[in-house]
Amino acid sequence: MVSENNSSIVFEGLLFPKIFRTFRMAIQPTKLIIIFSALIIICLAGWIMDHSETVACKRNTKGKIIETELQIYMANQSQIHKYIETNRGKSRGTGVFSTLWHFTAATFQASVDSVFELKIKGVGKNIKEYFKAAGWALRHHFIYCIIFFVIYLCVISIAGGAICRIAALQFARGEKPGLTEALRFSTQRFTSFFLAPLTPIGIIIVPVLFIFILGLIGNIPWVGELIIGISMPLALIAGALITVVLIGMFAGFNLMFPAVAYDGSDCFDSISRSFSYVYAKPWRMGFYTTIAAVYGAISYTFVRLFSFILLFATHLFLELGILVKIENVSKLTAIWPKPTLTKLIDYSDIATTNWTESIAAFLVYLFLLAVVGLVVSFIISFYFSANTIIYSLMRYKVDNTAIEDMYTYFDETEIEPVITDSKTEQNPPV
């Protein structure tokens, strides 16, 4: 009996199992609605901006893209300028957003597969390729990236902040705030959510400029190299500051939004908390993040499998009822290609025979995009929910702050002292 009590106490003292509550929190309809709406806005912005068609590509005779400049860049960076000059103008280009969307989807799926196969190098390779693709976008489509990034950050600051707030209230107090309440909180704290990821970049700019200017001074004959030698200690200090901020930014980035949602922090306080938690207990932070990543991969696979079975069953039973064929294939296949586990949706290569079939194919594709959008919404909801839990656990271990202790609107209410006018009654003279 005593041993059972001791074991229960030990298990209750473990914090990492609390991360396994993330799936139930992430699948909540309110969160999925918020993220799905944000995805619609982001995709709509990307679709509008993609009308510029600035990405060079090759298309087949049916107009389907078979190669883009991103693929050339990933294979051999030195060939991209020649590729752009050769193919730009020969065929209609495509957009940066759609190009990165397809590449990111494939990279993400490959990363999940590597996690299940326990290939750490595979995960690292896919992450490296993702950053390499981002580098392509910044180098060759800089203006596009800046405009889109501002739009994205504005939308995700409101949506992600609302998700973190809901997750914080669920995890800390078991409450389930409504959609309006969560969005009201994120809009009121919009400045903190928006500036939190940008502030570390602003901090880095100062030492970067110092080192850059010092390098320019080094071009001066005779004097330049002496100034560099004398100023080397200052340059090393600036480099150390850049390193500290970069490590804190990449390792603690996931905690910035939860810090605002949990403690009502401003952007500077959220950065301070995320940095301090990472540097105070880096191994614990890495352990929690690894558990969340593996659990997230399992959860994503389950959701994707569910979506595949849903689409496959629908396609199968529809196909049994459709007997008409187009180009020796079922009419349904011409409208809606059969889904696979690796590719839930795809455009049909078979030409439709009339305009009604074209409209039907478009509507089917639109509704299938909604299904995929819900899968992506779950991933984003899981990300914010898991990091909110990790933030709470790190705060408990570093600051010894109870999980239930979080910011509420009542904390900003100032209680004014009540002033009472008490007049002393004087006794009448005798």
Image: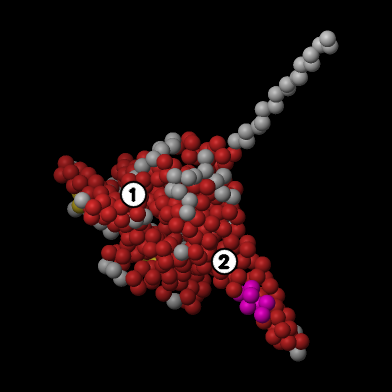
* The residue positioned farthest toward the front in the image shown: 430
The answer to whether residue 305 is left or right of residue 284 is: left
Q: Position of residue 215 (x, y in %)?
A: 68, 79
| Residue to which mark 1 is pinned | 21
Please name the predominant secondary structure of the magenta segment in the image: helix
Disc sitting over residue 367 in the figure: none
Instruction: Pick the residue in front: 161 or 64.
Output: 161
Q: Position of residue 165 (x, y in %)?
A: 47, 44
| Residue to which mark 2 is pinned | 245
Label 1: few (<14), some or many (≥20) within 10 Å? few
Q: Residue at x 47, y 54 (%)?
A: 400
Task: Tell me if residue 341 can be seen.
Answer: yes
Label 2: few (<14), some or many (≥20) within 10 Å? some
Extent of the magenta region: 233-239
* The residue positioned farthest toward the bottom in the image shown: 222
Q: Is residue 234 magenta?
A: yes
